[in-house]
């Protein structure tokens, strides 16, 4: 029997304790967001079938000058709340993973949540002054985790 050692952050296994400790000591980035932050992720993801208040641009009709570019000028942009923060589950990854949930989609027809990262995917950006209603309603979503990529 050969002993193996596991990094408690990324789950990779190593033949020596020193290698596992070195992996754990890897300078993991600090989260740029906090649980409870209201953020924008990407426009044009999903469809509106939930609470209209969670759509930041509910009257968007597309941009006749350039067609649908899937940005906020052409498609809905939802408010999301950061409901949990953990580490990417990809082997060897130490990057921060953010779980985002919105009430703009009800979840019966598709994605109400998703996870993403600071880099390498659709990076979330904090909304400077989110509507009070969104902040209040977001409290009930804290702790939920997404099972798929945003």
Image: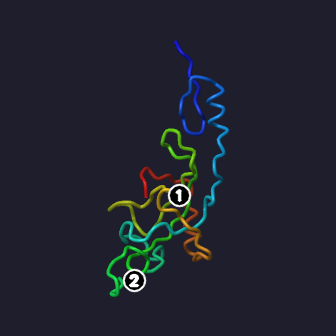
Indicate the quadrant where residue 125 lies: bottom right
**Category of crowding for the residue at label 2, using alpha-carbon neighbours closer than 10 angstroms: few (below 14), some (14–19), many (at least 20):** some
Q: CA distance from mark 1 to mark 2?
A: 28 Å
Residue 145 image position (x, y, % from top left): 50, 52
Q: For mark 2, give the secondary structure.
A: loop
Q: Give the left or right position of residue 86, taking residue 101 as reference.
A: right
Residue 62 image position (x, y, % from top left): 35, 82
Farthest residue to the bottom: give it.
Answer: 65
Q: Which mark is residue 83?
A: none
Position of 13 relative to 92 (above/below): above
Farthest residue to the top: give it.
Answer: 1
Position of 129 relative to 145 (above/below): below
Query: Image point 52% across, 12% down: which residue?
Result: 1
Position of 93 relative to 38 (above/below): above
Q: Which residue is mark 2?
A: 60
Residue 70 image position (x, y, % from top left): 38, 73
Residue 26 image position (x, y, % from top left): 65, 41
**Category of crowding for the residue at label 1, using alpha-carbon neighbours closer than 10 angstroms: few (below 14), some (14–19), many (at least 20):** few
- Front residue of 141 and 72: 72
**Nearer-N-terminus badge (1/2):** 2
């Amino acid at each position: 029997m050969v002993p193996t050692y596991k990094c408690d952050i990324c789950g990779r296994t190593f033949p020596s304790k020193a290698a596992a400790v070195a992996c754990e000591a890897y300078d993991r980035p600090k989260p740029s967001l906090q649980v409870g932050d209201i953020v924008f992720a990407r426009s044009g993801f999903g469809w509106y079938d939930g609470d209209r208040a969670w759509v930041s641009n509910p009257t968007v009709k597309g941009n006749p000058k350039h067609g649908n570019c899937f940005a906020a000028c052409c498609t809905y942009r939802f408010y999301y709340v950061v409901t949990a923060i953990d580490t990417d589950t990809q082997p060897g990854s130490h990057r921060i993973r953010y779980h985002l949930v919105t009430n703009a989609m009800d979840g019966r027809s598709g994605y109400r949540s998703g996870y993403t990262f600071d880099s390498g995917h659709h990076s979330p950006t904090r909304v400077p002054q989110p509507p009070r209603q969104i902040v209040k309603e977001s409290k009930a979503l804290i702790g939920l985790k997404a099972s798929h990529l945003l």
